[in-house]
Every structure is written in C-alpha cells, then in structure tokens.
Amino acid sequence: MEKLNDFKRNSEYGFTLIELIVTIILIGIMAAAVIPRFLTSEGFGEYTYRDELIIKLRAIQLRAMQQTNNVACQIIRVNTSEIGLLATQINTNTCNGVLAGDTTTVHIPSENGISFSISENLSSFRFSSMGRPVGCVASNPCKIKITLTITGSDPLSILINSEGYIYAL
C-alpha cells in the first residue's frame, strides 16, 4: 500500500520526460507553421477581396431587385483587375461606359498579383428583377463562377447559382 501512495505522489509533480519531449515537439511544429502567417500579409488580401466582392455583388443584386422599372443601369462589367456596376447616363437612362463608383466596384491594384476571371468568358452580366443572374451564353439556367487568381497561391472562387445565391466556394 505504501508503494502505491509513493507512485501517486510522484506522478503529481508534473510531466514525465516522454510527455515533455512530445509537448515541446508539437509546440515547435505548430510554431513553425503558424508564426510565418503572422509576419506577412500574404494569404489575407485575396480573402479580403473575395469577401468585398461578395458583399458588393449582393448589394448590386438587391438594387436590381428593388429597381425594376429599367431606369437604372444594372450591367456588371468584368475584367481582370476590376468588377463593378456601370454608371447610368442620367438623360437617356442608358448604361455609361464607366463604372458607377467605389460602393459598387472592386478594383485590385496590379502590384497585388490578384486577378479576376469569370466563367464562359463573359465581359458583363446583370441580375434580373428576381435576383437571378442574366447574360450567360451557353448555360441555361445561368450560373456564374468568378475566380480570383492569386500569383503563387490556390485560386478562390465565388459562385452565383441559377437562383441568385452568391457564396464563396
């Protein structure tokens, strides 16, 4: 009985040598994987642009659903460095060739190494009064996939399904 009490008392003092070594190795592996992520901003910019694009596409979609009288331009222009709603020409209620502004446009500076691409090689699309994407060439119902390609990293994608739900893949 006395030996059992000695064993209990000794095990209450801390880690065994094996447990200590395994713990130090695990902490070292985690530190080697996590610390470099905090020292640079790489890997965060593309997620920020993706989230910003989802928010702005949803805002444009809501605008299209609320303005059903065809007075405002609802066309979204896409190129490799920006996606945005075209401005409405006030006198004629037609689409202007320039983007409407910062609230409905995502612009990526070239030094970030991030570019947009869109399924079916579309240069523009719009949302219907029901919030559904319109303007696809081949597929009916229209389903649009926007891909953010980052230099040296895995691409991030946004999907606008045929019913208009916008989400990140």
Image (spheres, rainbow, N blue to C red):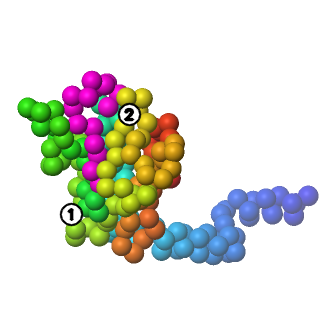
Q: Distance between the residues labelled 2 and 1?
A: 30 Å
Q: Which of 30 and 133 is in front in this view?
A: 133
Q: Position of residue 29 (x, y in %)?
A: 54, 73
Mark 1: few, some, or many residues within 10 Å (few <14, many ≥20)? few
Q: Where is residue 141 in the image (x, y as percent from the top left)?
A: 51, 42
Q: Residue at x 63, y 75 (%)?
A: 21
Residues under numbered marks 2 and 1 in contact, where contact means CB atoms less than 8 Å apart: no
Q: Residue at x 59, y 75 (%)?
A: 25
Q: Nearer the viewer, residue 74 or 38?
A: 74
Q: Where is residue 91 in the image (x, y as percent from the top left)?
A: 8, 32
Assess whether residue 69 is covered by the magenta stretch. Answer: yes
For the N terminus, the image quarter is bottom right
Q: Mark 2 points at which residue?
A: 128
Q: What element carries label 2?
A: loop
Q: In this view, does 159 lie above or below 40?
A: above
The kind of residue tagged 1 is Pro
Q: Is residue 78 above or below residue 67?
A: below
Quarter residue 37 falls in: bottom left
Determine which of the numbered discs, if any, sits on residue 109 in the image.
1
The label nearer to you, 2 versus 1, is 2
Q: Is mark 1 on a helix, strand or loop?
A: loop
Quarter residue 103 falls in: top left
Please give the range of residues in magenta.
64-78
Q: In this view, does 90 lie to the left or right of 69?
A: left
Q: Which residue is drawn at 26% across and 67% down?
A: 112
The kind of residue tagged 2 is Ser
